[in-house]
Amino acid sequence: MTASEGSAPVILVVEDEAPIRRLLTVLLESRGYRVVGASTGSEARIRAAETPPALVVLDLGLPDDDGITVLRELRTWLSTYVLVLSARTLEQEKVLALDEGANDYLTKPFGSAELLARVRVGLRSSQEARGLPSVVEFSGLRLDIAAREVSVDGRPVQLTPLEFRLLVELATHAGKALTHRHLLVHVWGVGSVGRNHYVRVCMANLRAKLGDTASHPRWIYTLPGVGYRMVDRDDRSAERDEHR
Ligand code: CA
């Protein structure tokens, strides 16, 4: 793992069929998630302990253990959102999985869009359970952190994973001055401290994509020699009104 992957949500994909596991990995990674794969129940336990996942996609039909057994055991120490996959269409299996602590259920074959939608719902609910906001809104800027979607004036904006994490760090600390060091530690990882040019380059790209400028900022203000502060224009006008 490189430092730049530090804050992408980790999804543990437990699936014994390699082509499906690869498909899920490519699909989830294309959305900026970090995927940890496991092909057996025992591997799933090891991977979950090594890298606590933000969400687990669990196939019920595994070669060593029944997925229900894996789920039951994971649930004794892991509270993560579990999305169960199964080729079985029996109502009873779904009920059993849900009774054993699965949060959601998807029957194979499933479409990519449906899987991604279920993953977004799962991550959003985990995020809310941890007390973190899943959606942050500024005037004209909407940031759906769980879904990793950003829009400006209603138009979707495509950000790289780093640009997205930089924006999340600023948006979840709105109103606060964030130093270059803070941003390097929380976005790039502690090994990048001192490389202020990482922040400057990424910030320039982020601003260009958002249509924000350093000289006439809409949301992101440069604090010369210090760092940056993200402010909602609406809040600023409220501040000015108070001082009138
Ligand atoms: Ca299977």
Image (cartoon, rainbow, N blue to C red):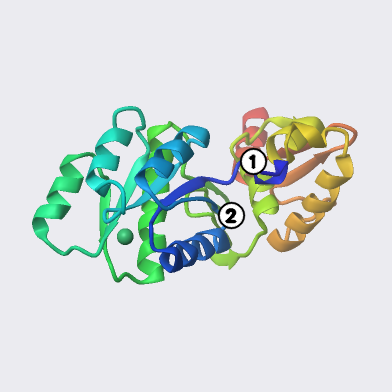
Q: State whether residue 51 is above or below residue 56.
A: above
Q: Would you say 159 lies left or right of 136 here? A: right
Residue at the (26%, 53%) spot, across then down: 60
- Amino acid carrying label 2: it is Leu
- Given residues 212 and 184, the one toward you in this image is 184
For the view shown, which residue lies furthest in the front direction?
64
Per the image, the residue denoted by label 1 is: 6
Query: x, y percentage for residue 100?
Result: 19, 39
- Given residues 90 and 45, the one toward you in this image is 45
Q: In this rendering, does residue 161 appear at all?
A: yes
Q: Are marks 1 and 2 in contact (CB under 8 Å)?
A: no
Query: x, y percentage for residue 57?
Result: 37, 52
Residue at the (45%, 41%) spot, across then down: 54
**Label 1's element?**
loop
Per the image, the residue denoted by label 2 is: 141
Q: Nearer the viewer, mark 1 or mark 2?
A: 1
Q: Would you say 82 lies left or right of 6 here? A: left
- Given residues 227 and 199, the one toward you in this image is 199
- Amino acid carrying label 1: it is Gly
Quadrant field for ligand 1: bottom left
Mark pair 1, 2: CA separation: 25 Å
Quadrant for the C terminus, please.
top right
Q: Is mark 2 within 8 Å of ligand 1?
A: no
Residue 120 image-quadrant placement = bottom left
Which of pointers 1 and 2 lies earlier in the amino acid sequence?
A: 1
Q: State whether residue 101 is above or below residue 35.
A: above
Residue 87 image-quadrant placement = bottom left
Quadrant for the N terminus, please.
top right
Crowding near the residue tagged with mark 1, few <14, some 14–19, many ≥20 C-alpha atoms within 10 Å: some
Residue 117 image-quadrant placement = bottom left
**Label 2's element?**
strand
Query: x, y percentage for residue 179?
Result: 79, 31
